[in-house]
Image (tube, grey):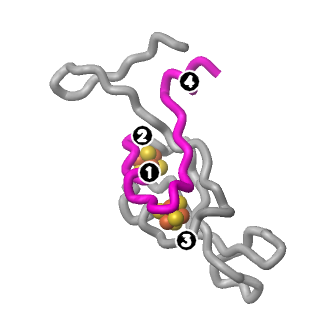
Amino acid sequence: MSEFQALRRDGTPWQPMFIEEINGETCIGCGRCFKVCTHDVLAMMGMTEDDELVAPDDDEVERMVMTIANIGNCVGCESCVQVCGSKSITLISAADVIAA
Ligand code: SF4
Ligand code: SF4
């Protein structure tokens, strides 16, 4: 484990938790994570019957799923995880990102 440690404004320790993965099988495409993320990390996509990701307006769309479009924009706030009722989002600590 890395020694990395972030701080809150008051100087107390805080460990950023970045988004790592969204489970496309359990995601119900509700869009709640998209609404709370203010860093342009996420994008709604369509999923076909054959589990292929396609544009949301594609004729073959069977259901909608959230995807990670700009992972480098994530600031590790965890808001997306807190609103996901299907527990589809996996996070990784900043320390583990640095150690990888
Ligand atoms: S952890 Fe925060 S910044 Fe990162 S994807 Fe989730 S809501 Fe967006
Ligand atoms: S909040 Fe969860 S279930 Fe809803 S779109 Fe985001 S990852 Fe999918």
Dot 3 alpha-carbon crowd within 10 angstroms: few under 14, some 14 to 19, many 20 or more: some
Could you tell me residue 8's position as x and y percent? 24, 27
Per the model, the C-alpha gap separating discs 1 and 3 is 14 Å
Which of the two discs, 4 and 2, labels the residue nearer the N terminus? 2
**How far is mark 2 from mark 1, CA to CA?**
13 Å
Cβ of disc 3 within 8 Å of ligand 2? yes
Is 70 rendered above or below residue 7?
below
- Give residue 17's quadrant in the image: top left
Q: Could you tell me the amino acid type at mark 2?
A: Val
Query: Magenta includes 36?
Result: no
Asked if residue 15 lies left or right of residue 10, the reply is right
Of the numbered discs in the image, which one, if any, rests on residue 29? 3
Is the residue indicated by label 2 positioned so its CB lies within 8 Å of ligand 1? yes
Mark 1 touches mark 4? (CB < 8 Å): no
Amino acid identity at mark 3:
Gly
- Residue sitting farthest toward the top: 3
Q: Secondary structure at mark 4?
A: helix
Mark 1 or mark 4: which comes first in sequence? 1
Residue 33, percent from left and from top: 44, 60
**C-alpha distance separating marks 3 and 2:** 22 Å
Residue at mark 1: 81
Which of the marked residues, 1 or 3, is nearer the chain's N terminus? 3
- Extreme residue in the right direction: 50
Is the Cβ of the residue at disc 3 closer than 8 Å to that at disc 2?
no
Amino acid at circle 4? Asp
- Provide the residue designation for mark 2: 75
